[in-house]
């Protein structure tokens, strides 16, 4: 099975940018559709972005559309979430997740379809 490790989180001022990385090991990332989710303090986990096996299709939550970009480099076994124009409401622990059932251009927007999860990386946006 695949192991996922997120990095790139931190403290940033409102309006700033961050790039989160999700490094996979154990199996090649090209076997998995990927997703990013987040959990803010006191809130439920929510979908952020998803990308298909080879990156040909992406999906975003309305709250981040136009500010975030999900990508993947299968040769480096790494997925990314580029976030810009960050807002205090983006403060959360961000998790990457992998799904080995989706095929082709399919993406998963529900956490229930993802079997493998990283430990998360904290993003804090100050006003």
Image (cartoon, grey):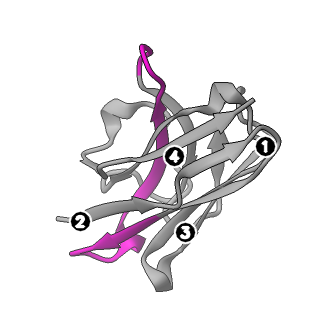
Residue nearest the observer in this picture, 12 or 112 = 12
**Label drawn at residue 67:** 1
Q: Dot 4 surroundings within 10 Å: few (below 14), some, or many (20 or more)?
A: many
Whether residue 126 appears in this view of the structure is yes
Label 1 with label 3: CB-CB less than 8 Å: no
Whether residue 71 is in magenta: the answer is no
* Quadrant in which the C terminus is drawn: top right
Question: First in sequence: mark 3 or mark 4?
Answer: 3
Q: Nearer the viewer, mark 1 or mark 2?
A: 1
Question: First in sequence: mark 1 or mark 2?
Answer: 2
Magenta stretch, residue numbers: 22-44
Q: Dot 3 surroundings within 10 Å: few (below 14), some, or many (20 or more)?
A: some
- Please name the residue that numbered disc 2 is placed on: 2
Label 4 with label 2: CB-CB less than 8 Å: no
Q: Nearer the viewer, mark 4 or mark 2?
A: 2
Q: Nearer the viewer, mark 3 or mark 2?
A: 2
Label 1 with label 2: CB-CB less than 8 Å: no
Q: CA distance from mark 3 to mark 4?
A: 11 Å
Q: CA distance from mark 4 to mark 2?
A: 18 Å
Q: CA distance from mark 1 to mark 3?
A: 22 Å
**Residue 80 % position (x, y):** 57, 62
Question: First in sequence: mark 3 or mark 2?
Answer: 2
Residue nearest the observer in this picture, 121 or 97 = 121
**Residue 43 % position (x, y):** 44, 15
- Please name the residue that numbered disc 3 is placed on: 54
Q: CA distance from mark 3 to mark 2?
A: 17 Å
**Residue 74 % position (x, y):** 49, 78
Residue nearest the observer in this picture, 69 or 120 = 120
């Amino acid at each position: 099975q695949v192991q996922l490790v997120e990095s790139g989180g931190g403290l940033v001022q409102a309006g700033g940018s961050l790039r989160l990385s999700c490094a996979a090991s154990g199996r090649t990332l090209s076997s998995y559709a990927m997703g990013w989710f987040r959990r803010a303090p006191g809130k439920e986990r929510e979908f952020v972005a998803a990308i298909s096996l080879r990156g040909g299709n992406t999906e975003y939550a309305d709250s981040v559309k136009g500010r975030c970009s999900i990508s993947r480099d299968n040769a480096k076994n790494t997925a990314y979430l580029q976030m810009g124009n960050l807002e205090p409401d983006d403060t959360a622990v961000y998790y990457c997740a992998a799904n080995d059932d989706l095929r082709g251009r399919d993406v998963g927007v529900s956490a229930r379809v993802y079997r493998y999860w990283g430990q998360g990386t904290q993003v804090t946006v100050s006003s």
